[in-house]
């Protein structure tokens, strides 16, 4: 015959299970995507291969290897390395590439580097995180507006010139 203590334990466990199930059901009946994010997904993203081709075709870019990944560690992220001919401000190259990639998958962060070869010297690398932390959405939205954007960086707020950088002849 069960003791009073074991019946109480079963009641508590049963009540706890009922609360968990009820909370799960309440979560399922609400709007699964907050309204703020719903607006972001109301467009058709430009396919990745087209975005990557546009990045390769940017002024000053002589090579680019860009990819998309979505995993538990990084989340949704465009990442890659660009090579510049040195004629363009490397931050402007990163800015233009980020504006293009912003037209891609919803809520994706962006992490890029641009390498500027120097004759007889070690190439200099610049990263998008030096310009702006584009791996999180708030700075991306502040800089490029809501997705998908125009694919062009904003002209009202130009990017700075990296210290020590001079255009290649």
Image: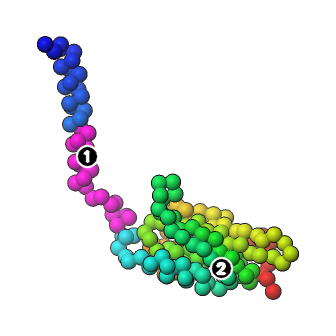
Query: Magenta part of the protein: which range?
Result: 19-38
Residue found at the far right of this picture: 120
Quickly name the residue at label 2. Answer: 63
The quadrant of the rendering that contains the C terminus is bottom right
In percent of width and height, residue 130 lies at 67, 64
Residue 160 is marked as: none
State the predominant SS element of the stretch in magenta.
helix
Q: Mark 1 to mark 2: distance in Å?
A: 49 Å
In percent of width and height, residue 111 lies at 58, 66
In percent of width and height, residue 149 lies at 47, 78
Q: Please give left or right for residue 68 compared with residue 115 in the image.
A: left
Residue found at the far left of this picture: 1
Can residue 92 be seen?
Answer: no
Quickly name the residue at label 1. Answer: 24
- 90 and 53: which one is in front? 53
**Above or below 21: residue 167:** below
């Amino acid at each position: 015959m069960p003791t009073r203590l074991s019946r109480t334990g079963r009641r508590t466990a049963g009540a706890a299970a009922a609360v968990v199930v009820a909370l799960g059901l309440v979560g399922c009946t609400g709007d699964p995507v907050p309204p703020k994010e719903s607006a972001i997904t109301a467009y058709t993203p430009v396919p990745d291969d087209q975005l990557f081709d546009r990045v390769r075709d940017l002024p000053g870019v002589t090579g680019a290897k860009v990819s998309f990944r979505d995993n538990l560690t990084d989340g949704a992220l465009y990442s890659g390395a660009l090579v510049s001919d040195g004629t363009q401000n490397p931050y402007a190259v990163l800015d233009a590439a980020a504006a293009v990639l912003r037209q891609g998958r919803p809520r994706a962060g962006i992490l890029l580097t641009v390498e500027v070869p120097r004759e007889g010297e070690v190439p200099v690398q610049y990263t998008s995180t030096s310009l702006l932390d584009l791996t999180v959405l708030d700075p991306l939205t502040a800089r490029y507006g809501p997705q998908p954007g125009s694919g062009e960086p904003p002209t009202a707020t130009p990017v700075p010139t990296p210290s020590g950088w001079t255009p290649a002849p």
